[in-house]
């Protein structure tokens, strides 16, 4: 394979390269905000390794997740919208009996069937109450990490509080053996394990390594922000003390990405490794679980339907893929069919995800997606849909967490490190140069960075912006108005009727879930203060499936008339098609009567 000095010249030379069964390293950040990577324009919190990967790779600039961790991860692993799985809404509590239904087939199972070694390092977060929810029973050959939503970064304990009790215990496993002989920072341990998996892997077998970091999510015990102490000096110029601690978590994760890439190069695996870096959702800048991450200049925070919660960081890299910005829609459900296609397979099951492998390869720039069901949360009573440029939000979630947050966190005490120097000194920068002969063109990197820097379009404080109610939702043109400040609901009635009906259809199909209930049988004290599964697969659940709540928007007469018109048009089309088919049949019958043969 040939490598070239200027990464931005690659589209002219290797755009037609074929990739056969690449190793796949999928890295997930937890609650990383839009403004928490420096390639989006900010020089405050620097992520040189992630940035360098992006400048040499594909930036998925309109990548959408769900609004919280469990639904986002469920969608990624199944290729299905979380509402079809009962996985929508708030993430699974530590003592909650819930998980992805065992009838669903997950991504690692597809890849294992295609000959891959499948390994999970880090967070699971999609069910642990019963054995059939565990990673080893869902397609992973090995598992090293934690099963719940969050753990303490030094003790690896998780605390779960409910009205009934407070439970606590260790949630850290090597496969399902409790890890009780560690006390180092969690990011360090997960990184070392990921590097070990790479170093010990037989490179003749394709590798799937899913590295799911805890960072920069808050800790799951009593302490919230727990960065490694050596990361604090790297961010001493950040003025806000809690933003500085958050930055330490991000810095350690960025270094982890560099260590993983270096390990791949060390094993001569880098040339044929597809590396994905994403966040599972936006940051909770404010609120009960705030981590002082920032989605600025987007509106909202994690757990809301605004862009700040669901439009996330996403980068794809392979040595043979031309670097560029992809501005088409890409959804978290798309990873399953896309990665299976990259591995040489095809998904035959009915899913919501779209195969975008040719888009990543730059073989096809025709958008593969025109719409996305962004999220449905029937317990909190809202839903959101993106269709082309338009985004509709319905529901009644009050005035909480609907603003543009993070601007007050951007202050610095003194000059920040020079961005160019930090980039060129990154571990990935050195590895790419020494292993692949790839040199970063700083000028072109700045051009790419400027092209995706939305902060420069922010016009200051926005007032009187739309918040949906049960009587009226909000409609935005996201391409023209990414900050969701110019409501088009009243001026675009036809679009409102069409998108409202589409949302009602999804709402009718969702699998209802109950309010989170702590199962008293989960108490880790009964199992040596370890968060082990507490139920057999066939055990009786304390939760009963609830009825479907009403759609959170009143039906209007215009909407009913629109539905009637749609049905009439559909009926007319079917009748015309039937007459056309029968007409051809009658013509052939008449011809046969007068045939001379």
Image (cartoon, rainbow, N blue to C red):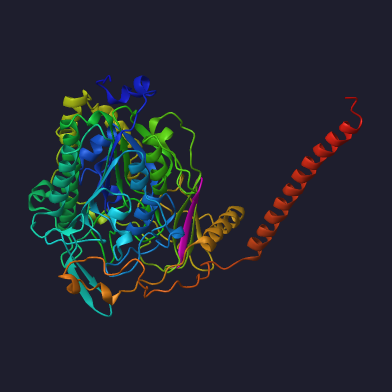
Q: Which residue sits furthest front?
A: 597
Using the rendered view, name the quadrant where residue 401 is placed. Answer: bottom left
Residue 233 spot, x, y in % from top left: 8, 48
Q: State which region is magenta.
A: 381-389
- The C terminus - image quarter: top right
Q: Is residue 592 left or right of residue 490?
A: right
Instruction: Residue at 7%, 49% (x, y): give it.
Output: 230
Residue 58 at what x, y percent from top left?
34, 35
Taking 313 as reference, is 581 left or right? right
* Magenta residues, dominant SS class: strand
On the picture, is 581 further left or further right than 65? right
Determine whether 165 is above or below 65 in the image: below
The residue located at (55%, 61%) in the rendering is: 504
Foreground residue among 475 and 502: 502
Magenta residue check for 354: no
Residue 168 rendering spot, x and y as whole percentages: 18, 70
Residue in view at x 13 percent, y 49 percent: 188
In the picture as drawn, the residue positioned furthest to the bottom comes out as: 164
Nearer to the camera, 43 or 534? 534
In the displayed structure, would residue 570 be above or below residue 262? below
Residue 244 image point, x, y percent? 16, 54
Please, is residue 266 above or below residue 173 in the view?
A: above
Answer yes or no: is residue 127 visible. no
The reply to whether residue 592 is visible in this rendering is yes
Towards the viewer: 359 or 525: 525
In this view of the protein, which residue sits in the foreground, 340 or 57?
340
Total numbered labels: 0
Q: Is residue 101 left or right of residue 568?
A: left
Quadrant location, the N terminus:
top left
């Amino acid at each position: 394979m040939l490598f070239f000095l200027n990464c931005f010249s690659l589209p002219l030379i290797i755009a037609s390269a074929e990739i056969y069964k690449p190793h796949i390293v999928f890295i997930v950040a937890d609650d990383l905000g839009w403004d928490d990577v420096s390639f989006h324009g900010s020089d405050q919190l620097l992520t040189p390794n992630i940035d360098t990967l992006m400048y040499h790779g594909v930036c998925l600039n309109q990548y959408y997740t769900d609004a919280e961790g469990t639904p986002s991860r469920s969608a990624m692993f199944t290729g299905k919208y979380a509402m079809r799985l009962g996985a929508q809404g708030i993430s699974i509590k530590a003592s909650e009996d819930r998980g992805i239904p065992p009838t669903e087939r997950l991504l690692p199972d597809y890849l294992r069937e295609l000959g891959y070694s499948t390994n999970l390092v880090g967070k699971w977060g999609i069910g642990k109450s019963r054995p059939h929810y565990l990673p080893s029973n869902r397609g992973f050959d090995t598992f090293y990490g934690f099963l719940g939503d969050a753990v303490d970064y030094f003790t690896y304990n998780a605390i779960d509080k409910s009205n009934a009790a407070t439970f606590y215990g260790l949630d850290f496993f090597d496969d399902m053996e409790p890890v009780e002989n560690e006390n180092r920072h969690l990011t360090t341990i997960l990184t070392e394990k990921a590097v070990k998996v790479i170093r010990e892997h037989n490179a003749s077998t394709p590798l799937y390594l899913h590295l799911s970091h805890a960072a920069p999510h808050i800790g799951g015990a009593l302490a919230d922000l727990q960065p490694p102490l050596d990361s604090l000096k790297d961010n001493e110029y950040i003025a806000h003390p809690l933003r500085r601690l958050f930055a330490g978590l991000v810095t350690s994760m960025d270094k982890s990405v560099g260590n993983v890439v270096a390990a791949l190069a060390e094993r001569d695996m880098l040339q044929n490794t597809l590396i994905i870096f994403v966040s599972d959702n936006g940051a909770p800048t404010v609120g009960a679980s705030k981590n002082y991450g920032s989605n600025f200049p987007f509106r909202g925070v994690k757990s809301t339907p605004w862009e700040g919660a669901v439009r996330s960081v996403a980068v794809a890299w392979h040595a043979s893929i031309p670097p560029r910005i992809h501005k088409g829609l890409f959804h978290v459900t798309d990873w399953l069919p896309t990665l299976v296609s990259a591995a040489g397979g095809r998904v035959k099951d009915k899913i919501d995800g779209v195969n975008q492998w040719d888009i990543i390869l730059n073989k096809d720039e025709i958008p593969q997606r025109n719409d996305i069901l962004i999220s449905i949360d029937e317990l909190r009573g809202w839903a959101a849909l993106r269709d082309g440029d338009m985004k509709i939000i319905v529901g009644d979630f009050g005035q909480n967490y609907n603003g543009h947050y993070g601007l007050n966190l951007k202050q610095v005490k003194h000059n920040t490190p020079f961005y160019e120097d930090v980039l060129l000194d990154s571990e990935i920068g050195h590895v790419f140069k020494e292993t692949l002969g790839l040199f970063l063109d700083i000028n072109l990197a700045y051009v790419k960075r400027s092209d995706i820097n939305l902060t420069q379009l922010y016009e200051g404080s926005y007032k009187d912006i739309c918040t949906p109610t049960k009587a009226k939702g909000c409609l935005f043109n996201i391409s023209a108005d990414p900050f969701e400040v110019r409501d088009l609901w009243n001026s675009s009635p036809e679009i409102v009727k069409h998108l409202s009906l589409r949302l009602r259809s999804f709402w009718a199909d969702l699998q209802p879930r109950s309010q989170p209930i702590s199962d008293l049988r989960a108490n880790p004290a009964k199992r040596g203060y370890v968060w082990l599964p507490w139920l057999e697969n066939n055990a009786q659940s304390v939760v009963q499936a609830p009825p479907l709540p009403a759609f959170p928007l009143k039906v209007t007469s215009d909407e009913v008339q629109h539905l009637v018109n749609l049905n009439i048009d559909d009926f007319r089309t079917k009748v015309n098609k039937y007459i056309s088919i029968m007409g051809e049949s009658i013509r052939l019958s008449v011809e046969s009567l007068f045939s001379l043969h």
